[in-house]
Amino acid sequence: KNDLGMSNYPMVPGHEVVGEVVEVGSGVSKFTLGDIVGVGCLVGCCGGCGPCERDLEQYCPKKIWSYNDVYIDSQPTQGGFAKATVVHQKFVVKIPEGMAVEQAAPLLCAGVTVYSPLSHFGLKR
């Protein structure tokens, strides 16, 4: 319904993404073909601004959302329901072997939303 007035159509929402790595770029060192991975709400950033240098990419003025946004090549991001998505390895986590993907996906949204700031500010005990 575009209640917030910022929707770009066509849009395929969904930001708790779990899937299999089917291709890796030449600079990728953390993942290999066949890895089961997860992605949260960001797929990219500029990497060079103050927030990025402090691992606070959510404040990057050039961050790229997993859906309703555009990649640096002007192609639309299509979220977790798309056939495939492109993500910088910084925003990808490996899903532990034996964990069901339907259990992992919610952890990428609500779980990270709670855990990340606690970890960042040294409050995880």
Image (tube, helix red, strand yellow):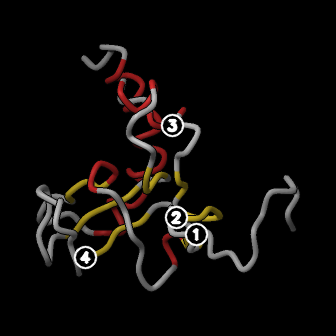
Outermost residue, bottom side: 83
In which quadrant will I find the C terminus?
top left
Q: Residue at x 43, y 56 (%)?
A: 43
Q: Residue 46 at what x, y percent from top left?
A: 44, 44
Q: Amino acid at mark 4?
A: Glu
Viewer-side label of 3, 4: 3
Which SS class for mark 3?
helix
Which numbered disc covers residue 74?
Answer: 1
Which SS class for mark 2?
loop
Which numbered disc covers residue 5?
Answer: none
Return the disc, 3 or 2, that comes first in the chain's sequence.
3
Which numbered disc covers residue 71?
Answer: 2
Q: Amino acid at mark 1?
A: Ser
Label 3 Cα neighbours within 10 Å, binned few <14 / some 14-19 / many ≥20: some
Outermost residue, top side: 122
Q: Amino acid at mark 2?
A: Tyr
Which residue is tagged 4? 20
Q: CA distance from mark 3 to mark 4?
A: 25 Å
Which residue is tagged 3? 58
Label 4 Cα neighbours within 10 Å, binned few <14 / some 14-19 / many ≥20: some
Contact? badges 2 and 4 (CB < 8 Å): no
Contact? badges 2 and 1 (CB < 8 Å): yes
In which quadrant will I find the N terminus?
bottom right
Q: Residue at x 38, y 40 (%)?
A: 47
Q: Residue at x 45, y 36 (%)?
A: 57
Viewer-side label of 3, 2: 2
* In the rendered image, the vertical position of residue 58 relative to residue 35, given as above or below: above
Viewer-side label of 4, 1: 1
